[in-house]
Amino acid sequence: MAVTEAPGRQLQTPWIERIPAAWWALGFLLLAMPAFANNFWLFQVFGWTFILGIIALSLMFLAGYGGMVSLLQMTVAALGGYMVAILGTSGVEQISLGLPWWLTIPLAIVIAAVFGTLVGALAVRTEGIYTIMITLAIASAFFYFARQNYGIFNGYTGFNLVVPPQLFGVDWRQPTAFYYLTLGCAVICYAAVVYVSRSPFGLALQGVRDNPRRMAALGFNVTAHRIAAYTLASVIAAVGGILLVWQNAQISPGTAGIPAVIDILVIAVVGGIRRPIGPFIGALIYVLLRTFSPDVLSAFGLSNERFKLLIGLGFLAVVFFSPDGVLGLWERWKARRGRRRDPLTGKEAGQ
């Protein structure tokens, strides 16, 4: 006898069945990447892509879901990297404290998150260009403070020999191990942003983004939601900063320089600032241009420094044709393709 579903109730599809086939294919490709990619692609290209994508993801969370454009995220990431070097071990033994990794990493994330939260508490009281200017001013102040302070940040030289701990007998700075480490952190940060965006807090934050006055009238604390968003974004940026210092095995004030701060904004905007996958797409485009454009320019007898011109032109082109970045171009192409198909037959017009 057939079992009928009770009126008004619908069977919920398991979440694992709602994942598109394209995502399964992408996941399999990323997991199998070390089987056919060399160490350069694993460590330099994809490792760097995941790291920059994580840092840009923190900006996407603030701008996409909170409506707050912050230029502080690279500074928070650099502070997390500095704390790992200062609290843990490095080549500057007279400054580094040599604490164990299980204490160094959480403390570094907490200190960076507290710094980002304090700045966020100041920035959320402004809007628009004023928020950008405040966060940019603090980022500039941190850069000059780190470059001129030798007692804590070791001045212009910074720290070297900052490497990840060897856990489970694995050297996590080897290309394959580091690739999986950055991939795992990127997946966790991406999943965290997606989960939070669908939680009551995330939905309230998006409501604050769209209409803060109405949300305040409904009883929501607008300022508290915005500051909490800065805290979560700072935690994500700190994770990316720790991975970045481990990849380079060193950190200096240039890591938090204004060019690096602007690069994170470019990465987030080019990829698409409305979806969590956008920063990783933008990071991949940036890394490919940054890595291979100097060779292309040299082949034409041009200076290697011109790669910044290429990145700038690409940024202008994407913003001009699609304010939503590369993802916006993709959505527009799919919508145009859908309009060309007959709704009954599914065939393209003219067939």
Image (tube, grey):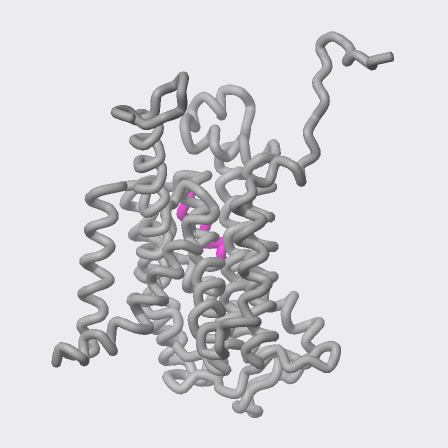
Residue drawn at (53%, 77%) of the image: 246
The image shows a total of numbered marks equal to 0
Q: Residue at x 22, y 67 (%)?
A: 308
| Image quadrant containing the C terminus | top left
On whether residue 117 falls in the magenta region, the answer is yes
Question: Horizontal placement of 261 versus 227: left or right?
Answer: left
User: Does the magenta segment cover residue 172?
Assistant: no
Q: Is 120 positioned to the left or the right of 85 in the image?
A: left
Does residue 72 lie above or below 303 as drawn? above
- Quarter of the rendering containing residue 139: bottom left
**Which residue is at the far left?**
301
Q: Is residue 79 visible?
A: no
Is any part of residue 76 visible from this angle?
yes
Q: Is residue 12 left or right of residue 228?
A: right
- The front one of 11 and 4 is 4
Q: Position of residue 166 (x, y in %)?
A: 68, 81
Q: Which span of residues is magenta-colored?
A: 116-124
* Residue at the spot 18% in from the left edge and 58% down from the top edge: 313
121 or 29, which is in the foreground?
A: 29
- In the orientation shown, which residue stands out farthest toward the top? 7
Residue 123: x, y in percent?
40, 47
Asked if residue 303 is positioned above or below residue 65 in the image, the reply reads: below
Q: Is residue 8 above or below residue 317?
A: above
On the image, which quarter does residue 75 sit in? Answer: bottom left
